[in-house]
Amino acid sequence: MTTSVSSINFTGAGQTTTAIGNAVTVNIPGSIGTAIVGETPTGAVVDNNLVYTLAHTPIAGTFELFYASRLVATTDYTLVGTTITMTAALSPGSTLQANYSY
């Protein structure tokens, strides 16, 4: 999702959408879990930090990680439960965001 998007409309019975900060959570009954879009994992983006934490454990195959708005290759991190471990430190001040279902 880019900053140029101002709204997304979900329709259908029973769907709920909540927004906290920059993260949007969409729950669509009958789908694979609850979708998280744009979650900023906890952990400081500083020269020596490699570990970041998600709010929930992603369903296998649903996780995407973005660094400075670019999709991160799965070879550049490991994901175990809610813990993301980068293979190299990120540049200070850059943004890290995750999309996934849980």
Image: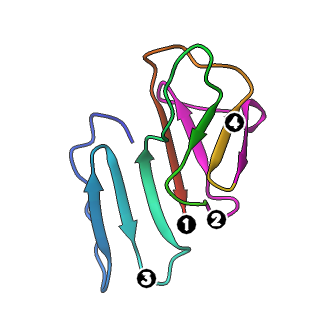
Q: Which residues are magenta?
A: 58-80
Q: Nearer the viewer, mark 1 or mark 4?
A: 4
The kind of secondary structure element at disc 4 is strand
Q: Is residue 9 left or right of residue 72?
A: left
Comes first in the chain, label 1 or label 4: 4
Comes first in the chain, label 4 or label 2: 2
Say if mark 1 contacts mark 2, CB within 8 Å: yes
Query: What residue sits right under mark 2 in the picture?
Result: 59
Expressed as whole percent of the image width and height from the top left, the position of residue 67 reads 53, 28
Residue in the picture at 28% in, 74% down: 11
Query: What residue sits right under mark 1 in the picture?
Result: 102
Comes first in the chain, label 1 or label 2: 2
- Residue 60, quarter of picture: bottom right
Residue in the picture at 37% in, 61% down: 25
Say if mark 4 contacts mark 3, CB within 8 Å: no
Query: What residue sits right under mark 3 in the picture?
Result: 29
The CA span between labels 3 and 1 is 13 Å
Q: Is residue 6 left or right of residue 65?
A: left
In the drawing, what numbered circle is on residue 38? none
The CA span between labels 4 and 3 is 31 Å
Q: Front-most of 14 and 87?
A: 87
Residue in the picture at 30% in, 86% down: 13
Residue 83, compared with residue 85, is above or below; it is below
Residue in the picture at 45% in, 27% down: 95
Residue that extends furthest to the right in the rendered view of this protein? 75
Query: What residue sits right under mark 4 in the picture?
Result: 85
Q: Which amino acid type corresponds to the residue marked 1 in the rendered image? A: Tyr
